[in-house]
Image (cartoon, rainbow, N blue to C red):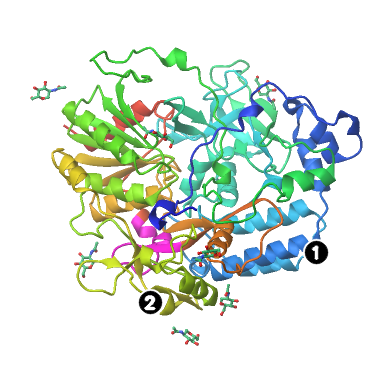
Amino acid sequence: MVTFTLNNLILSASLAVATIAAFSTAAPTAPIHRTTVGSDPCGRLGSKNIRKIKYKDVADCYKAIPIDREIASTTINAVHDLFRDFYVFTDSALTPQVPAPFASEPVDILKELKTIGGRKYTSDYQFHTDVRHAVDTLRDGHASYDVKCYNNYGFEQNLTLYAPVEEGVQTLRVYKDNAKRGYEDCIVDKIDGNPSLPHIRAWATKRVSCSHDVNARQNCALARQGYDVKKGAFLDESGEFSYQSYLPDKGYVDYELRCSNKRPSGPIRLREEWNVYPQTEIAFKDVKSYVAKVCMITEDEPKSGPQAQFRPHRRNLVIPIRKRDLESDDDVTAAADGAPRRLFQEFRDAEKLVSGNATVFYHLKTQPDTGVMVVHTFDAQDEEVSTVLKGLNALHNRNVTNILVDFQGNGGGLISLSSNLVQMLFPSKQPRDASYEADLRVNKSAQKAAAVGFMANDGGYNIYNANEYYDLQTTGPASRYKNNDLFTKPVNITRNGRTNLYSEKTAMYFDPLSAKIVKAVAKFPWTGRRENIRILTDGRCGSACGMASYFWTTTHGVESYSIGGNKGEDLSMFSFSGASVITLKDVHDTYAGLNLTSPLEELAYKNEVRFSWLELYGKNRTIPLEYDAELYRPKHRLDYTSENARSRVVMWKEVVAAAWKK
Ligand SMILES: *[C@@H]1O[C@H](CO)[C@@H](O)[C@H](O)[C@H]1NC(C)=O
Ligand SMILES: *[C@@H]1O[C@H](CO)[C@@H](O)[C@H](O)[C@H]1NC(C)=O
Ligand SMILES: *[C@@H]1O[C@H](CO)[C@@H](O)[C@H](O)[C@H]1NC(C)=O
Ligand SMILES: *[C@@H]1O[C@H](CO)[C@@H](O)[C@H](O)[C@H]1NC(C)=O
Ligand SMILES: *[C@@H]1O[C@H](CO)[C@@H](O)[C@H](O)[C@H]1NC(C)=O
Ligand SMILES: *[C@@H]1O[C@H](CO)[C@@H](O)[C@H](O)[C@H]1NC(C)=O
Ligand SMILES: *[C@@H]1O[C@H](CO)[C@@H](O)[C@H](O)[C@H]1NC(C)=O
């Protein structure tokens, strides 16, 4: 029997940087079913040495999969009904003109899905691709449609790209040349014959869905660094343009480079194919067995059930990490100040003091009054709180007075951890200081579930237990619902001309920070002082990260620095923050756990269909935070340079110098 409480369970989508399936870098496994090599496109793919797989092999197999109209029809109906009855932004997405820093088109997702449902597809691949793209147009990092069938291979370019500003001019350049030809920092004049920066911009606008903000999307598309817990260091990441988890539009990318340090001085023209990485080890010998084993939910995998695992894992953020030669950077040894455990020191100018599963604490040697708290994810257990306390104590022992919070690339995780972290810098004065107002969609099915789900604790995952939410209608200290009013007394909300039922306003329930921690943080010189705290973000701070960012900036007035995007333009402090995420499977599990029939059909294909189910509001705001663009604008802007993009400590020093001018 599995009993979870809601606040432990509501994970927001994780941008957790995952390594590509380990075996893809291991020795090639023996090819399977050699005898069937022939005219079957998936047979050819399945029998190939995994190191030799090319774009065309995958494309041929994918495109040979015939459509099963019955499966397609069930699929589109389930996805449509999910977005009609459960997705919380279906009506908000119709917003005609979203203000800067957002730039997204109004989307009528139901109409889009209906259109797809009405088409006579002959290609299964095209059908699923269209559904995925339709969901992506919402630009909600919490909403996605993924089927294993078509993300069974990842595609990587050897060149990764970024857009630094040097001497006031922004150009697209090579961030890293994984083929070691030395093209780093060559200017990319053209991609596929087009001026490169507009090309990337257009690609990010159309293909990236991590934010409503195009500049944040640009950052999602391009290369950067991310903290790797296992390696204990910042490693290079390709970005969504150079690492694609779905079949790219074509088999190569054309680049025109200009390298000042290279002869000849003329443009260097490269046609770069994709490196292909299988994402599973499932064997198949033809189209039929590919569908049966890779695409379809198989017998040995439980379809739905309360005991099923709930782990977020967002597709386009599964990024291969290239091993950097850590040895060569290890030119500093850990300070021998009697510390019981030596931490790998990657920077000369910053000493790593403490690290956990979500946070890392550095002391800046050049600015000894400043400490850096890197929060690279919230996808960790609540016990991370003790790591944070340890880290803050370590900084305090070094006489640090200023804290820089580095949120870059943080895709969220546990919102209870987020709430705790907020309070560790700004202890709450009221129980609900660190919680959002929120509401969710209600209709007959939800009410049916809630009638059974109220106080039902043994069904596992249950978003329909009103007791897990704050009753804002009661006077006095906020308390959890003691009845089912949340679901039995819905209200009509009309948005962009459409009316739907939502719950009355509520808030998620979080236990307040323990008295012990409140007491422990009280002694720190930065606690409760906005002038001693700054935030650094690249706009890729989603979900639980956006929540913490919102509270620190809007409620507590902490100033934030946003880096990257297009020079001179706004760049959001955070992305897809206005909601909480679950999957289609979670809906099934919820109903199964309550012994009810799910109102949505099961999909035949292995899938991850994620969506926002709970929308949040900023304090005293009437539009949901997800669409409240004003609250995303940063106080300060920074640009990437060739130096700060490759060294986090250089970036921190720039922020610190700007933030705490002497
Ligand atoms: C990428 O670079 C590696 C290392 O040089 C090389 O082995 C590989 O073939 C290259 N990939 C493509 C697609 O050119
Ligand atoms: C990190 O997570 C693992 C797995 O949950 C856990 O065993 C470990 O104690 C955690 N480490 C820290 C420092 O919290
Ligand atoms: C911190 O400041 C105290 C008081 O000024 C001093 O005694 C101590 O040596 C300082 N510690 C460090 C690590 O600099
Ligand atoms: C929710 O309500 C709509 C409109 O009343 C209805 O068409 C739909 O079938 C309901 N969905 C569920 C899952 O009950
Ligand atoms: C919501 O609006 C519909 C008509 O649009 C109406 O029939 C229904 O009674 C309203 N429900 C509530 C709770 O106001
Ligand atoms: C569902 O059915 C099982 C088995 O009959 C029972 O143990 C469980 O309590 C039921 N759950 C709910 C929420 O009614
Ligand atoms: C929200 O409104 C209340 C009541 O008008 C006011 O006291 C409070 O300061 C406002 N909070 C914010 C963050 O605007």
Question: What type is the residue that disc 1 sits on?
Answer: Lys
Q: Residues within 10 Å of mark 2 (few under 14, many from 20)?
A: some
Question: What type is the residue that disc 2 sits on?
Answer: Asp
Tell whether 275 sits left or right of 212: right
Name the residue located 27 percent from the left edge and 66 percent from the top edge: 479
Q: Which residue is mark 2?
A: 485
Name the residue located 72 percent from the left edge and 49 percent from the top edge: 298
Q: Secondary structure at mark 2?
A: helix
User: Residue 207, position in %: x, y?
Assistant: 60, 49
Q: Secondary structure at mark 1?
A: loop
- Most foreground residue, 108 or 101: 108
User: Residue 365, position in %: x, y?
Assistant: 25, 22
- Residue 166 visible, this orientation: yes
- Most foreground residue, 142 or 355: 355
- Most foreground residue, 167 or 318: 318
Name the residue located 73 percent from the left edge and 44 percent from the top edge: 294
Distance from label 1 to label 2 (Cα)?
45 Å
Quarter of the image with the C terminus in it:
top left
Tell whether 647 sits left or right of 174: left
Q: How many marks?
A: 2
Compare marks 1 and 2 and give the one earlier in the sequence.
Answer: 1
Marks 1 and 2 in Cβ contact (< 8 Å): no
Name the residue located 49 percent from the left edge and 65 percent from the top edge: 89
Magenta stretch holds residue 623? yes
- Residue 570 visible, this orientation: no
Q: Which residue is mark 1?
A: 120
Instruction: For ligand 2, give the image quadrant.
Output: top left
Q: Over which residues does the magenta segment extend? A: 614-631
Question: Relative to 524, does residue 545 appear above or below in the rendering?
Answer: below
User: Residue 143, position in %: x, y?
Assistant: 54, 56
Task: Find out if the beta carbon at label 1 lies less than 8 Å from the nearest ligand 4 atom.
Answer: no
In the image, which disc is placed on residue 28?
none
